Amino acid sequence: MKPTVLVVDDEEAFGSLLAEDLGELGIAATVARSSADALDVLGREPFDVVVADVKLRGPSGIDLCERIVAGHPDVPVIVMTAFGSLETAIAAIRAGAYDFLNKPFEREELAMRIERAAQHRLLREEVKRLRTAVARSEGDRDILGQSGPIQRVLTLLDRIGTSDASVLVTGESGTGKEVVARAIHRRSRRRDGPLVAINCAAMPETLLESELFGHVKGAFTDARTARRGLFAEATGGTLFLDEVAELPLGLQPKLLRALQERSVRPVGSDREVATDVRIVAATNRDLEAAVEQGRLREDLYYRLDVIRVELPPLRARGTDVLLLAQHFLEQIAERAGKHVTGISPKAAERLLAYSWPGNVRELQNSIERAIAVARYDAITVEDLPERVQRHRSSDVLVTADDPAELVPMEEVERRYVLRVLEAVRGNKSLAARILGFDRKTLYTKLQRYGGSEPDRSHDEARSHPPVARSRLS
């Protein structure tokens, strides 16, 4: 493809003639007559190269070059002048100009330099993309595990690689939802395109709308230049919507339309812009409950939840805890320059016994802490965070020897759920996290139990029975 060029010259006849000559060579050119006009046009339209005269009304071409380098660093600038001197050339290079050209010149010479500048820009973008791709491929190694739950996730990721359907990644906080989103992108046909991520809970509705869909210049008070938006940035690739359950209700119809019509309308614009993105959304919330409570549109929920990837909590992954711990140990120890190579058996027991409410993220932070304070070449129990050191498995009491007096498993669950709820003083969110339920499941169980207070009458009737004790990790 031929590059697009912005020619900046205050001599109208020369600028028009130059644009016409470039057009005959297949290079589309737009003319601006001052630095201010050039910056205004650059704010509204993308260009591959800027060609600017040194002598301009108002700020010079050197000043313009500095402004473009600061505000549009990916756009190379060629400075041209009829008063060529070494000082002018040095000033242009110091301002960040890609090239310097003395008038008069042949149009073929200018076209050659424009194409070279455009190729330079493409090369810079490719290097940036490759660096990002290498960083992402390094991150993919974090999806480690030999347990059944994580292997099922990896199998599903391989199966959906060729699909463009929307994916909803669910799981507790810290289970690695963004890591999985990157893995989905790398396994897809869009792997050579961009992966663009946004946290839907990180900004207010007005800014989030502009961030997603873009805006035109003057759309609101601070909109001094146009912005493409993340849907446009992710074209040909994947858009990752993290914490999608926090999306403001007023913005949900616009996102739904963008997904249905495959186009967006920038803020302040009267035109639709076509998009080509695959959506991967993530949440640690119960979206069905959000729909029932009116916090999430049902039609948007079904549009997002085409393929669901449910990430298991770390406590359900067995010895994967040690596999991940060793992986983090090797990474962090190398980065910290400490000779820590393993985990002592007793420390490994504590890691396996702990429930990891913060999941993989908490494990990584715990290993980082352990390496920071470690005195030996293996992590010991004393190096682990105190909460991991102090953790003890819960005991389940079987308070009878007569089989006729033993209760069904459902009754054991009921008593344990109510006991946990009592221990956390009625905090249902905390109780659900400890039990490994989502809030909706906990509410359903409490409704089935007929209340939130434990029934102790059965226990009080047997105040001193023989006790058989078993361990429940």
Image (cartoon, helix red, strand yellow):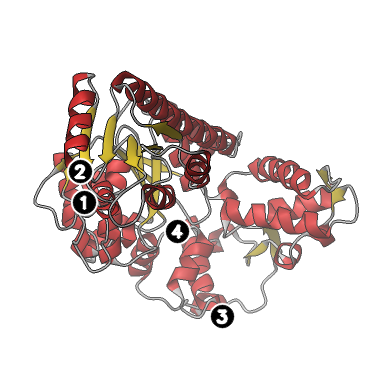
Kindly report which numbered mark, 3 or 4, lies closer to the viewer in this rendering.
4
**Image height of 373 relative to 424, above or below:** above
Where residue 447 sits in the image (x, y, percent)? 33, 69
Q: Amino acid at mark 1?
A: Leu
Mark 3 — residue? Answer: 460
Quarter of the rendering containing residue 444: bottom left
Query: Percent position (x, y) of residue 253?
Result: 16, 55
Q: Amino acid at mark 3?
A: Glu
The residue where tag 1 is placed is: 255
**Element type where label 1 sits in the image:** helix
Q: Is residue 331 left or right of residue 90?
A: right
Using the rendered image of the protein, determine whether residue 32 is visible from the camera's viewpoint.
Answer: yes
Closer to the camera, 284 or 98? Answer: 98
Q: Quadrant of the N terminus?
A: top left
> What is the spatial separation of the Cα atoms under label 2 and label 4, in whole angstroms?
31 Å
- Residue 362 drawn at (x, y percent): 62, 57
For marks 3 and 2, give the CA distance. Answer: 59 Å
